[in-house]
């Protein structure tokens, strides 16, 4: 399991734990006095008070009895030491409580909490330095090393505190020796720094993993959108022509069989072209990473074995074929060019072709029989496309047949080249689509 996976429970684990347990775990993980640090500080405070209370002198304390002798050997049994003649006072209780309560801020304000613990420890008699007090100092040293990001600051604070505490507790019989203080502080600093470094690296790894996952999701969404645009551009126009031609053939099938035959031929041609473009698109999508064809290494496969050659992507030179197909479907369309026509980058020409194709497809679906004009304007720094119709021939606009994905796909296509799209109803009637594509200057 990676460090990042250990930081946060998996969704499956969250679902299996009871809600009360999840809330308790989240509460204990929360830093500060209202979280797990507060409970730890409370426990240390109770332990400190209990240890100090145990060492209070008793008024009716009797002198310890003589040590009894063992039956088998002349060695006295060990007895507990007598209580202190002068027990801890209110000041000692207050300082020990201060050192314990400071643990509640060990993660949010580690330097301040550790400074309070050191100051409280220096203010008490070494004879009353109990185990809870030593534990609070160890926790403070660990917290500074683990939660202060700058190594110089963490090491400086811990080193200064260690020197002061060693001076307070020299190597004597009464109180913790200075070397023990040095060993505790040094070991806690090393442990805290190691865990803090691991946590920082694990957090960075977790963030990188999340960022990579988001980037992967965005890439997948972009690829899906691109495939959807390609499918729409390839299928929508030809299918619209096929639907219109099929309807025309059905209407004149008995009265004019020749016209019906021509319409059905147009349907067949549109279907074949759709299949060819779909095959081409699928070949392009599956070309990357596809293994080479298997066979006899000494035999070169012929063209049929490798499949049909890929046709070039449509560009503006194929506009006359597109316009002729639309005219056959019943749309009165004209092409007008402004400026000096010139070859453009393939991506821009493909985008311009798709704009005209989508606009004419919408005119076929929503304005059958309308007079439509396609205007291409070549400028030194941009290419402008306008497709405008004057509305349906019978004045009635059919109900929308799609969800507007075509214009949305065009907007995304144009955005890839820094262009824009405007589409809407004309004041004089009909519909107009305008697109602008920046053209890089040589």
Image (cartoon, grey):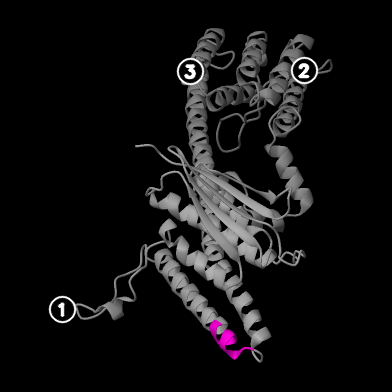
In the image: residue 212, left or right of residue 311? right
Name the residue carrying label 1: 298
For residue 351: magenta? Answer: no
| In the image, farthest residue toward the right | 60
Graded by Cα atoms within 10 Å as few (under 14), some (14 to 19) or many (20 or more), the crowding at tag 1 reads: few
In the image: residue 27, left or right of residue 405? right
Residue at 51% across, 62% down: 230
Residue 112, compared with residue 103, is above or below; it is above
Residue 298: x and y, percent?
A: 15, 78
Residue 403 appears in which quarter of the rendering? bottom right
Looking at the image, tell me whether mark 3 or mark 1 is earlier in sequence order.
3
The residues colored magenta run 256-262
Residue 50: x and y, percent?
A: 76, 25
Gap between marks 3 and 2, in whole Å? 38 Å
Comparing 179 with 399, the one in front is 399
Residue 357 appears in which quarter of the rendering? bottom right
Q: Which quarter of the rendering shows the C terminus?
A: top left
Disc 1 element: loop
Residue 409, compared with residue 237, is above or below; it is above
Does the image show residue 170?
A: yes
Front label number (3 vs 2) = 3
Looking at the image, tell me whether mark 3 or mark 2 is earlier in sequence order.
2
Residue 297 appears in which quarter of the rendering? bottom left
Disc 2 element: loop
Residue 381, compared with residue 312, is above or below; it is above
Residue 313, disc: none
| In the image, farthest residue toward the left | 298
Name the residue carrying label 2: 56
Looking at the image, tell me whether mark 2 or mark 1 is earlier in sequence order.
2
Disc 3 element: helix
Name the residue carrying label 3: 155
């Amino acid at each position: 399991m990676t460090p990042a996976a250990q930081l946060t429970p998996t969704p499956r684990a969250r679902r299996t734990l009871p809600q009360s347990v999840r809330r308790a775990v989240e509460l204990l993980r929360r830093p500060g006095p209202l979280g797990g640090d507060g409970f730890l500080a409370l426990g240390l405070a109770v332990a400190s008070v209990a240890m100090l209370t145990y060492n209070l002198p008793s008024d009716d304390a009797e002198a310890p009895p003589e040590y009894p002798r063992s039956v088998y050997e002349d060695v006295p049994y060990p007895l507990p030491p007598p209580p202190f003649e002068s027990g801890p006072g209110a000041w000692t209780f207050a300082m020990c409580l201060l050192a314990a309560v400071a643990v509640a801020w060990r993660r949010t304000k580690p330097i301040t909490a550790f400074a309070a613990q050191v100051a409280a420890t220096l203010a008490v008699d070494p004879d009353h330095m109990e185990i809870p007090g030593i534990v609070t100092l160890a926790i403070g040293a660990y917290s500074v090393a683990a939660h202060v990001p700058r190594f110089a600051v963490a090491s400086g604070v811990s080193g200064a505190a260690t020197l002061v505490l060693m001076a307070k507790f020299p190597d004597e019989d009464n109180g913790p020796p200075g070397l023990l203080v040095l060993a505790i502080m040094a070991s806690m600093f090393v442990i805290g720094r190691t865990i803090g470094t691991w946590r920082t690296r694990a957090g960075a790894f977790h963030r990188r993993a999340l960022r990579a996952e988001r980037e992967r999701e965005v890439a997948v969404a972009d690829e899906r959108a691109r495939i959807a645009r390609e499918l729409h551009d390839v299928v929508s126009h030809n299918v619209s022509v096929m639907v219109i031609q099929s309807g025309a053939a059905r209407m004149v099938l008995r009265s004019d069989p020749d016209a019906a035959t021509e319409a059905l031929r147009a349907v067949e041609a549109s279907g074949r072209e759709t299949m060819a473009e779909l095959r081409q698109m699928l070949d392009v999508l599956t070309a990357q990473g596809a293994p080479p064809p298997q066979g006899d290494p000494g035999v070169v496969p012929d063209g049929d074995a490798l499949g049909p050659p890929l046709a070039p992507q449509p560009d503006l030179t194929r506009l006359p074929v597109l316009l002729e197909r639309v005219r056959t479907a019943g749309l009165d369309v004209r092409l007008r060019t402004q400026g000096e026509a010139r070859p453009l980058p393939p991506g821009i020409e493909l985008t311009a072709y798709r704009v005209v194709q989508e606009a004419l497809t919408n005119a076929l679906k929503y304005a059958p029989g309308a007079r439509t004009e396609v205007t291409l304007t070549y400028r030194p720094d941009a290419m402008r496309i306008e497709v405008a119709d004057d509305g349906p021939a019978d004045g009635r606009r059919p109900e929308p047949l799609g969800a507007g994905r075509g214009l949305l796909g065009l907007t995304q296509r144009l955005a890839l080249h820094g262009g824009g799209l405007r589409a809407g109803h004309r004041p004089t009637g009909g519909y107009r689509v305008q697109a602008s594509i920046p053209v890089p200057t040589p």
